[in-house]
Amino acid sequence: MGEVKRIGILTSGGDCAGLNAVIRAVVFRATEYDWKVLGISRATNGLMARPPEFTPLEIEKVDRSLTHGGTFLGTTNKGNPFAFPMPDGQILDRSEEIIEGYRMLGLDAMIGIGGDGSMAILRKLAQQGGMNLVTIPKTIDNDVDITERSIGFDTAVNIATEALDRLHFTAASHSRVMILEVMGRDAGHIAISAGIAGGADVILIPEIPYKISNLCRRLDERQAQGKNYSLIIVSEAVKTESGDAISCVHAHGEQRYGGIGQYLADSIHACNGAETRVMVLGHVQRGGTPSPLDRLLASVFGVAAVDLIAEGKFDRMVGWHDRRVIDVPIQNAIARYCVVDPESTLVKTARGLGIYLGD
Ligand code: F6P
């Protein structure tokens, strides 16, 4: 048995399937070392609260969480602690309160499960406060660099693929063009993967420009071949033909992508008269039971993160590369935003299948 450590774990940013499976793996592995694990509530907000908000995590508490969606610790994707919006409208730097919370809990190290934005914030906090940080990449968008996969991506692709599978039948029954708008932030990873897997006829991603006239030509060709319907999958961040991003502002003032599907539906109808319908898949892509692949990745990453702490290796992110787990400096993982490479195998495959991708 080694030295007894207290490690904290938190989930930060948008939730996704597989987060509870990561927490479970961390608790299982830490128990092997005989360490204590504290689950921090609502990302760094739990460390900001006084007293700090946390749940002691033991095997009995997490045993059944492998299949549970969401994060039982809670999370947030707003409120950067370095510019934190207070109820009275002030913007405050609350980073020192978080660092103090870490010290109040007597933590030896912390595991942060997050995407690129959360990792950048956590790293800045760790550097400022001398906190021992290891991160685990999670995001349905799969836009964290270096790791080939992030927790939650596979489940999101499964859900989008299933949606396309279902849309095939209703599109064929009504001789319609069905448009599926998927998430992904500024990257088209979900759309390109689900589009190929789900047999879409058109895949639009932010990385490749398109023309409505070319898109409609493709739809007309299908008609001429006797195919009475078409399926389009579009990433939320795809712009209009003239280059405008489409977004909406939610009640608390947060701006999010949304609406490109309806723009396409209207443009296609205006171009060739096709009957169009739009389905916006939205947050359903983040919910529900994690896929076996996400559970596997969660288990691998959870064990590896705890082992890094045992080795005294900090400021590192675990990742998946070439069929094995790796760890890299967090700085390297967040230095570049990972979009779909227009020369990638998936793009070439889609083109090879005759799918319209733009240009
Ligand atoms: O980053 C994950 C993600 O689901 C994006 O794909 C999407 O653009 C955004 O979060 C939605 O955020 P919110 O949950 O705040 O609506």
Image (cartoon, rainbow, N blue to C red):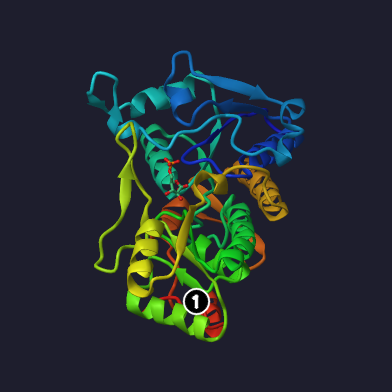
Is 134 positioned to the left or the right of 127 in the image?
right
Quarter of the picture containing the C terminus is: bottom left
Is 312 positioned to the left or the right of 12 in the image?
right
* Residue at which label 1 appears: 347
Could you say where residue 295 lies in the image, as x and y percent from the top left?
70, 49
| Disc 1 packing (10 Å; few <14; some 14–19; many ≥20) | many
- Residue 336's image quarter? bottom left
Is 336 positioned to the left or the right of 168 in the image?
left
211 vs 312, nearest the viewer: 211
94 vs 285, nearest the viewer: 285
| Secondary structure found at label 1 | helix
| Residue at left offset 45%, top offset 30% | 44
| Residue at left offset 69%, top offset 37% | 24
86 vs 201, nearest the viewer: 201
| Residue at left offset 52%, top offset 50% | 139
Figure disc tally: 1
